[in-house]
Amino acid sequence: MTYDILLFLHVLGATVLLGTGVGIAFFMVVSNLSNDPKLIAHVAGIVVLADTVFTATAAIFQPVTGYLLAREVGWPLFEGWVALSLALYVFVGALWLPVVWMQIQMRNLAIAAQDAAAPLPASYHRLYRWWFAFGFPAFGAVLAIVWLMLTKPTF
Ligand code: HEM
C-alpha cells in the first residue's frame, strides 16, 4: 500500500516535471517568435510563475518519493541505474537553476522594452540563445532519467 502511494506520487511528479518543462519551452519559443515585447513579457511572467508553482515543487518532492521508493523496494541509492539517475538529476538541476534566472532576466528586459516602446535589446536575444542551449541538454537528461527509471538496466 505504502509502495503504491509512493509510486503514484513519484510518477505524478514525473509527469508534472516533464509536462511543465515541455509546456514552458513551447510557450517561450512561440512567444519569442513574435518578437513582441508585450507578449513576451506576459508569457515570460507566467512561465516564471509556473516554474515556481509546479517545477520547483515537483523537483523538491521527486527525490523524496524516489528515496522512499528505493528504501521500500531495496534498491541501493548509490549503485547502478539509481546512482546514474541521481547524477543526471544533479546535472539537470545545475542547468535548470540558471535557466530560471535567465527567464526572470528575459521577462524584465521585455517589460523594460515594452515600457519604453522600444524593440527587444540584444541582451534579450543573447539570453534567449543561452536559455535554449541550457534547456536542450537538461530535457535530454530528464528523458534519460525516465528511461532509466522504466527499464532499470543492470550494468
Ligand atoms: C531524484 C531522484 C530519484 C530517485 C532516487 C528515484 C527513484 C526511483 C525508484 C527507486 C523507482 C523504482 C520503484 C520500483 O522499483 O518499483 C523509481 C521509479 C520511477 N521513477 Fe524515479 N527517482 C528519481 C527521480 C525521477 C525523475 C526525475 C523522474 C522523471 C522525471 C522519475 C520517474 C520515475 C518513473 C516514471 C518511475 C516508475 C517506473 C516503473 O514503475 O516502472 N524518477 N524511481
Image (tube, rainbow, N blue to C red):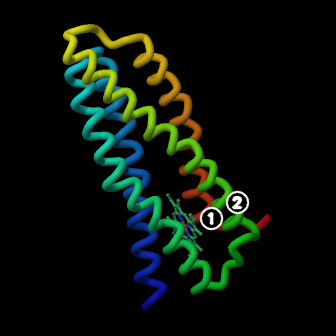
Q: How many labels does the image show?
A: 2
Q: Give percent across and percent down for residue 133.
A: 55, 29
Q: Is residue 104 left or right of residue 31?
A: right
Residue on which the image places disc 1: 151
Height in image: 17 above or below 139?
A: below
Instruction: Give the farthest residue toward the top.
Output: 118
Residue sitting at x 35%, y 40%: 24
Residue sitting at x 60%, y 78%: 70
The amino acid type, in three-letter code, at marker 2 is: Leu
Quadrant of res 53: bottom left
Mark 2 residue element? helix
Ligand 1's quadrant: bottom right
For residue 139, say whether it is visible: no
Mark 1 residue element? helix
Q: Is residue 83 left or right of residue 58?
A: right
Q: In which quarter of the image is the N terminus?
A: bottom left
Height in image: 40 above or below 51?
A: above
Q: Give percent across and percent down for residue 46.
A: 25, 40
Q: Which of disc 1 and disc 2 is earlier in sequence? A: 2
Residue sitting at x 42%, y 54%: 17
Residue on which the image places disc 2: 84
Q: Give percent across and percent down for residue 154.
A: 75, 67
Instruction: Give the farthest residue toward the bottom.
Output: 1
Q: Quadrant of the C terminus?
A: bottom right
Classify mark 1: residues with Cα within 10 Å, few (<14), some (14-19) or many (20+).
few
Q: Distance between the residues labelled 2 and 1?
A: 13 Å
Instruction: Give the farthest residue toward the right.
Output: 155
Q: Nearer the viewer, residue 89 or 127?
A: 127
Classify mark 2: residues with Cα within 10 Å, few (<14), some (14-19) or many (20+).
some
Q: Nearer the viewer, residue 5 or 92?
A: 92
